[in-house]
Image: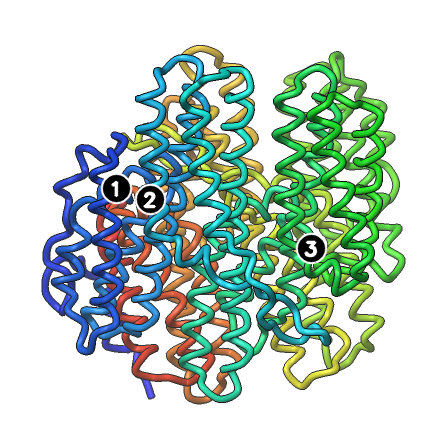
Amino acid sequence: MKFFSRFLIVLSSTLVLYGGNGMIDAIPTAHAATATASANAETIETAVTAFQTIGTLRRESPINTDAILNEYAGALQTLAQEIDTKHGLSLDSDILAAIEDIKNNNEPVLAGQVIDKAAQHIFFQIIIDRMTAAKNDFDTQASDALISTWGEAKAAFEAIKGTAARENKVLTADKQSVESGDNPQLDVQIAEAFARGETALNKENPAEDKINLSIERQIIRLSLARAYYIGVLREVEGIISNRGRDLLEAREKQKEGEIFYRIIESFIKQDNPTGNALIKAQFTGNVSNVVADKIVSELSKGFIGRVNAELKANESSIGTDRGRAMEVAEEALLYANVFLDDLALRMDGGVRSNLENALTSLKQASDSNDEAGAATARQTIADILASYAQLLDTAQYQVTTDTSFIDNAVAAYQAIGTLRRQNPIDAEAIATAYAGDLQQLTQIADSVYGLSMHNDILTAIEYLRNNDQTALAGQAIDKTLQRVFALVIYNRTTLALEAFENLSSDELKLEWDRAYAAYLAIIGTVGRENKVLTADKQAIESGSNPDLDDHVTLAFIDGKASLDKSSGDDKNKVALARENILIPIVRAFLIGVLREVEGIVSNRDRDIDEAREKQIEGEFFYKIVEGFIAQTNPAGSDRIMAQMKGSLASVVANEVVSEISKGIIGQVRINMAQIESTFSTDRNQAVLAAERLALYTHVFLPDLALRIGSIERVRMENALQDLKEATGQGEMEKAINAAQAILSIIANYESTLI
């Protein structure tokens, strides 16, 4: 049944998404002008009241969305916009899109949870920001002003103290689920810390009060983090207990867990980026894939990293900065409190007591500037944490076969990277490093794909020998070799999928390991921050980090786990993993193109040689992914390549971005059509196409937000998630609605491209 056909035509026309079709007719913007200003205590108290009222309204049936919108469009929205502006978030858009979903009866219960948890995120961040401001201004502001700022944080806590009052959640003894533990009374701890902090702001003993304020701030901050850690595990418990009997309830808990986790994501991501990717994947994927032990393990790994960081800070400050040593010792204890129950489960109560005693000893030694005592305590803590970490079920890629051929090629590539940065460049050393396994790998790739990369590299080496355009030649070598490794990744993962039935598990793992070994050569490129148009569309600037390297690493881990052939669905899982490897790598190279466009535009009027080098880099980067754009936008692809080869003055950032987006939109069209043709006949292929569609769409989502607004980005992300869920579950009506939303937003976006 061609149920998408009536929506494909949408891509050829421009649709305006404001007004009509049950959507919100007017997005409140009255408070946008004050979004960057700090709200005062009265505004915060009003926002807390609005939040509480919305909590009542969203539980009514039917839900009065106009009433919710009226409550939100005031002090609460002011806070949301303030936090979004300061921290680069999209909480305002998240809430507005969720209100619209309720109005359109699009999973209103889930949308209600988005509103609630996004609003909690607002208050959490307001608390942190106001406490930090009071700490930073301690020496320069009068007590009254500091107490006022501190009072704003205290006012915001009223909105979320219920979350802080909840009982602990811990793994069950068999590590299969989550259950309730003791109540840590975090709400009481936080309230007491607020009171002690306010006392310190009176500055009766300024030196000690400043230290005490820093400690109270950390008690509040990290107790709140622990409260949301508990909240995440509470939702994991709900997912697992409901997914076999009430799928809708399980999905509601999953959505709550997803939004809760965003609040504490930064605590995990810093020291456990791959684990962060795994947790997010479990909260946005199939509820059947949620594994309690894995989530707890990855959370613990992230918090262990934070404890270790505080131990290092303590070591560097003990004896020289007593206040700092005391503060970080307190932080170490607070971070460890998060996982103490899990440590006791995996080890024993005695080990827990030893850790608690050592953490207390570290605090005491820091207070008294006892360097020897602090060193002993730190060593005890580090040893226990190392043993605990070994017991966690964390995501790590394990190479189990001999990949020495690829490893040698990667090592040679890395050596060339060092050599080409030297001045003068030793061309013979580069030629020697290239000869051998790296050259052989390049020649194999040439023979498979009909390319001439080997000759390109030899030509570039000759330029180096002749001291002719050495910077450009070095870039040609580097980017050509990155193309070699990208092709190896594509080739080996594709072989593992296509030969899944014919090769043994060990043979498949060899190919997968080879692909992973090649990936390590380009992981630095894949891990770079995003590049986006500036607001005036005249140049390129850095955006947020999409963490593509961690996404790809996790996909490698997931794919390899499915090569055991222990499940009838394993080949489909390998196919999904392959897409989650290849498309993010394509995106990374497209980001690389824009990074070089940034360099061209910023240097062409002041450093022509530097601009020309960036142009060469852009050309070679674009060659790697040219086919993905040229397939559906051949004329646009030619325009991009012409800019990478022509006059520096002819490079137009907006045009390059627009043509890339047009090509990727073409890939979205292809996959939407594939979903249409396979939805009722081949569910696996439809699911795979929906995954590809989502991955491709994320390439241009930041640009979409720039051109048509962040709320449209949120709508798109929600629709992509709905389409993936509907395709996997065979829900035709939901799939139709999601497809309509996706294609409508794309049509609106496409109309803004040049």
Please tell me which residue is depicted at 62% across the width and 63% down the height of the picture: 295
Please tell me which residue is depicted at 47% across the width and 45% down the height of the picture: 190
The amino acid type found where label 3 is placed reads Leu
Residue 321 versus residue 28 in the image, above or below: above
Tell which of 221 and 22 is nearer to you: 221
* Residue 718, x across and y down, in percent: 35, 63
Please tell me which residue is depicted at 56% across the width and 57% down the height of the picture: 184
Secondary structure under tag 3 reads helix
The answer to whether 655 appears left or right of 699 in the picture is left
The amino acid type found where label 1 is placed reads Ile
Q: Earlier in the sequence, mark 1 or mark 3?
A: 1
Q: In the rendering, which numbered label is found on residue 156? A: 2
Q: Earlier in the sequence, mark 3 or mark 2?
A: 2
Separation of marks 1 and 2 at Cα, in angstroms: 6 Å
Mark 1 and 3 residues: CB-CB less than 8 Å, in contact? no
Q: In the rendering, which numbered label is found on residue 340? A: 3
The answer, for residue 52, to whether it is visible in the render is: yes
Secondary structure under tag 2 reads helix
The answer, for residue 635, to whether it is visible in the render is: no
Residue assigned mark 1: 44
Separation of marks 3 and 2 at Cα, in angstroms: 28 Å
